[in-house]
Image: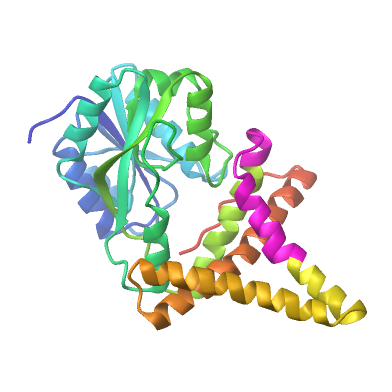
Amino acid sequence: MGKLGFDAVLIGRNEGARLLQALDRVRAVARHVVYVDSGSDDGSVQQARAAGAVVVELDPARPFTAARARNEGFAALGADRSEFVHFIDGDCILAPDWPATALAFLDAHPQAALVHGYSYEDAPDASVYNWLTDQEWKKPTGPAASGIGTFIGRSAAFAAVGGFRDGMIAAEDDELFFRLRNAGWQTWCIDARMCGHDVRLLQFSAWFRRMIRAGHSFSELGVLHPGAARASRLRAVVWAGGLPVLAVAGLVVWLPLVAVVCALYALSGARLWRRCRAQGLPPKRALTAAALLVLGKFANLYGMATYWARRFRRSDARIIEYR
């Protein structure tokens, strides 16, 4: 396959050999390739230059965010940029037939500002955390798709809405998709394999931090776009806030209330276990996954509180690294 009519912006931080694989796949088909580095110390910058990419190193004087990296990469394409730009995370390797499929879709759908397909974990069975992440990627298809950082879109539409919000540490993709739809565009997810991803979540602590980051984004999205992530916020407040408060109150005023709260957690866990079993997990791993999905609400609530504490202090957000 020869060069296609799009440019590519890859972002990364200490992605190692994975970055070179991502670059090799993109350079075979993209017109121009920009790599934006957020303070790597593993030789990524030198390797990307050797691979033929234009390299942008973010100034560490400002907080690193994926949003800022993508914006600076887009700016580095300059006035000679292509009609289409593909944003790609450095741990993602595009499926060989994805670029042609996506460009054909955009040509056939002039109201589509962007399109993405399915991401999939390369090693979903390496840990239950990897498997849960793989499930996250299974987003509904259609013209009002939720955000994902790897997508191909129209350069003009991206520029017209001002790109990503530099200061967002998570869900900057969802937030961009909202603004594009508010401007009259469609944001599509289609039934096609887009890229392999390597989350490398092997420890509970790393997964828990990832859930904290998600909670932070629930609060910020709700402020920027009222109604966004409302269900996620409500679940966190009820399961990680309201029910524990009821249980403590039960210890003081009415002991059977504690049993009711425990029963609700058990029922929720059983429902989640059945769902995980239906998705192919063996019984023991399904039990672990169900417990993590319940515990994740506590991390989400903590992340939501972190956002509001930062907003109260009027301090800049710092990325929540999880690996």
The answer, for residue 153, to whether it is visible in the render is: yes
The percent coordinates of residue 19 (x first, y second) are 28, 52
Whether the magenta-drawn stretch holds residue 222 is answered as yes
Number of labels in the image equals 0
Instruction: Quarter of the image for the C terminus: give it.
Output: bottom left
Relative horizontal placement of residue 199, taking residue 260 as reference (left or right): left
Q: Is residue 82 above or below residue 43?
A: above
Q: Where is residue 100 in the image (x, y as percent from the top left)?
A: 17, 33
Q: Is residue 17 above or below residue 27?
A: below
Can residue 51 be seen from the camera position used here? no
* Prevailing SS of the magenta stretch: helix
- Location of residue 126 (image quadrant): bottom left
Q: In this view, does 255 lie to the left or right of 114?
A: right
Quarter holding residue 275: bottom left
Residue nearest the observer in this picture, 46 or 10: 10
Residue at point 63%, 33% (across, down):
225
In the depicted structure, whether residue 113 falls above or below residue 145: above
Instruction: Residue at 31%, 29% (x, y): give it.
Output: 85
Q: Is residue 82 left or right of residue 13?
A: left
Residue 132, position as x, y percentages in the image:
42, 64
What residue is rendered at 32% in x and 67% in y? Answer: 124
Frontmost residue, 200 versus 118:
118
Q: On the rendered image, what quadrant is the N terminus found in?
A: top left
User: In the orientation shown, which residue stands out farthest toward the left?
Assistant: 1
User: Is residue 148 rendered to the left or right of residue 101?
Assistant: right
Start-end of magenta stretch: 221-242
State the residue at coordinates (33%, 33%).
115
User: Along the line of sight, which residue is nearer the eye, 242 or 53?
Assistant: 242
Asked if the magenta segment contains residue 276, the reply would be no
